[in-house]
Amino acid sequence: MKVTLRIWRQSGPDESGKLVDYQMDDVNPDMSFLEMLDVLNERLILNGEAPVAFDHDCREGICGSCGMVINGMPHGPQTLTTTCQLHMRTFSDGDVIVVEPWRSAAFPIIKDLVVDRTAFDRIIQSGGYISVATGSAPEAHSQLVPKPDADLAFENAECIGCGACVAACPNGSSMLFVSAKVSHLNVLPQGQPERETRVLRMVEAMDLEGFGGCTNTGECTNACPKGIPQASIARLNREYLRASLSGRR
Ligand code: FES
């Protein structure tokens, strides 16, 4: 199949960028989107041109490194799919595919399709952890977790921190990300010692990083490759209110 890639090229954080067209002939429909970019980059390197910079690591939908806006949609047109899991058979012969980086004030562009997502790391550092004694693993039944709580924690632990929620949100809000991290830990017994401080500190860090507020547009959940639900944001708000009233910081 033949496609035209219209890719955002920007040589550095302070440089101006523009969309550049690349004609791709002979694309294998079973290639992943990133493999197709690899082929483009091999061609660019052989021609002495700078390859397109993009983030990737696991290429299995696990690490959250990959992330680009494809035809206006974070991770492209297929739901519950990361960019690395997207295949070219999703597109049609002759398509023009527009590829842009995440666009958010809190995710400044480093180069081409690579953005700085360390704001997420700082939010995690502020409260996305639990305190446990080191040593050998505890006996599995020493701390019982009700099945509904385990399922809820697991559902939220699926967040891979890719930032698609921020890229999709018209406000650049990271509420879905923060709500997944808070929900994951706050519903488990292991997360109780820092239950209040966690949510207060993570929301404070989120605001300091310049993310916008949530106005319930729901675009974040639509874009999330792991299907983190809107209910997690409602839980975050309840946890925040509860912690605020508790007086603990
Ligand atoms: S490269 Fe790891 S999720 Fe896509």
Image (cartoon, grey):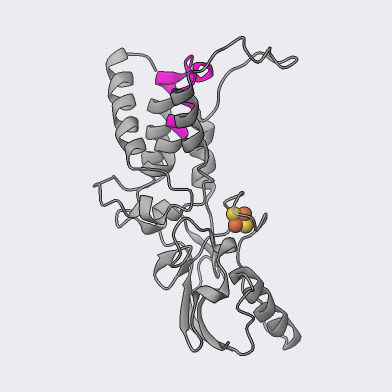
Residue 51 locus on image (x, y percent): 66, 76
Q: Which residues are magenta?
A: 181-197
Vertical side of 203 occupied by 88: above or below: below
Quadrant into which the C terminus falls: top left
The residue depicted at 47 percent of the width and 55 percent of the height is 80
Question: Is residue 187 magenta-colored?
Answer: yes
Q: Residue 93 versus residue 16: which sits nearer the camera?
A: 93
Q: Quadrant of residue 238?
A: top left
Q: Main secondary structure of the magenta part?
A: helix
Which residue corresponds to the image point at 47% horizontal and 85% vertical from the top-left? Answer: 95
Would residue 208 be found to the left or right of residue 65 on screen? left
Rendered view: 52 above or below 233: below
Residue nearest the observer in this picture, 52 or 231: 231
Q: Residue at x 75, y 85 (%)?
A: 46
x, y percent for residue 235: 33, 31
**Is 153 in front, or is 243?**
153
Q: Is residue 164 left or right of residue 236?
A: right
Which quadrant of the structure image shows residue 246?
A: top left
Q: What residue sits 30% from the left and 53% below the top?
A: 171
Quadrant of the rendered image holding ligand 1: bottom right
Whether residue 202 is visible, yes or no, is yes
